[in-house]
Image: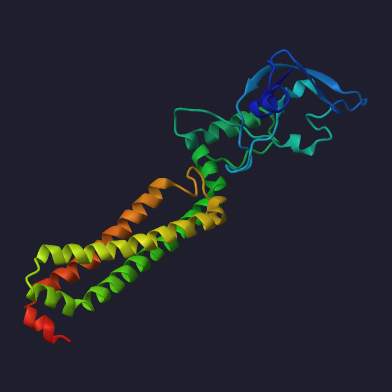
Amino acid sequence: MTIINAALAQAYFQNQEPIGQFISRIGANQNDGDPEQWQIVGVVGDVKQYSLRSKSPAVMYGSHRQHPWEYPGGYYADHLRKSLAIRTALDPTSLIPAVRKAVAQVDKDQPAYDFMTMEQRLADSIALERFMVRLFGVFAGLALILAAVGIYGVMSFFVGQRTHEIGVRMALGALERDVLLSVVKQGLKLTGIGVVIGFLASLGLARLIAGTLYGVTSTDPVTYLVVSLFMALVAFLASYIPARKAAKIDPMVALRSE
């Protein structure tokens, strides 16, 4: 009898009920080369054994009592090392002495070591991915700050260059609201063009970081939306503040700035 995982069931029994079917384990018996027939008695979920990013392989589970020539002390050396998983409502570390004692009662020469909680084991398995995410986060934050400073500086300079124009329009009777609206609209238009270009460029580079992401896609719409709105806000402030300051200046002073 054997239990298979969902990946094996999907690969070999797509249109059939796997329960009750027989599966061959070639070369399982050390005494002869005939395949051993195991009946499937259950299907379990897939387990990411090595990495959260790797696909679960097709796996079949069987009791060690079904192949004593392999375990214990058989020709598969890996079977000599076993992992024990314990589920408890208590503090897991408080059970370590009890586990050591229980193992010693079975075999006093058998060492019990490498005790870890499931949280610690999960953290170790994604340590590299977590480091890469933090590193990318730092770089992304710096890039966002530099982009915001650049946009603010360029837009402020652009509006400052229009001080004379603003003075002329104010002298001719233009309303402050209309002047501000005109300047802000032009600033947001330029920023919108830049955001679109950046969006298209990011889609082309998304594949470079797709392999380091887990639980989020490289084209996450929320991220694009938040960054775009942030850039639009920076552009708005960079246009509005200098334009409002220039509109408050006496028209004659603004005209003499040239």
Q: Of all residues shown, which one is farthest toward the right?
A: 32
Tally of numbered tags: 0
Position of 77 compared to 205: left or right?
A: right
Q: Is residue 212 above or below residue 18?
A: below
Who is closer to the viewer here, 250 or 235?
A: 250
Position of 201 compared to 46: left or right?
A: left
Q: Residue at x 18, y 68 (%)?
A: 241
Q: Name the image quarter holding residue 231.
A: bottom left
Q: Of all residues shown, which one is farthest toward the top?
A: 20
Color style of the picture: rainbow
Residue 64 position within the rendered picture, expressed as x and y whole percent measured from the top left: 75, 24
Who is closer to the viewer here, 43 or 99?
A: 43
Name the image quarter holding the C terminus: bottom left
Q: Name the image quarter holding residue 230.
A: bottom left
Residue 29 position within the rendered picture, expressed as x and y whole percent measured from the top left: 87, 25
Name the image quarter holding the N terminus: top right
Q: Residue at x 44, y 30 (%)?
A: 90
Who is closer to the viewer here, 185 or 1?
A: 185
Who is closer to the viewer here, 56 or 248?
A: 248
Residue 237 position within the rendered picture, expressed as x and y whole percent measured from the top left: 22, 64
Residue 146 position within the rendered picture, expressed as x and y whole percent measured from the top left: 37, 68
Position of 59 compared to 87: left or right?
A: right
Q: Residue at x 33, y 63 (%)?
A: 191
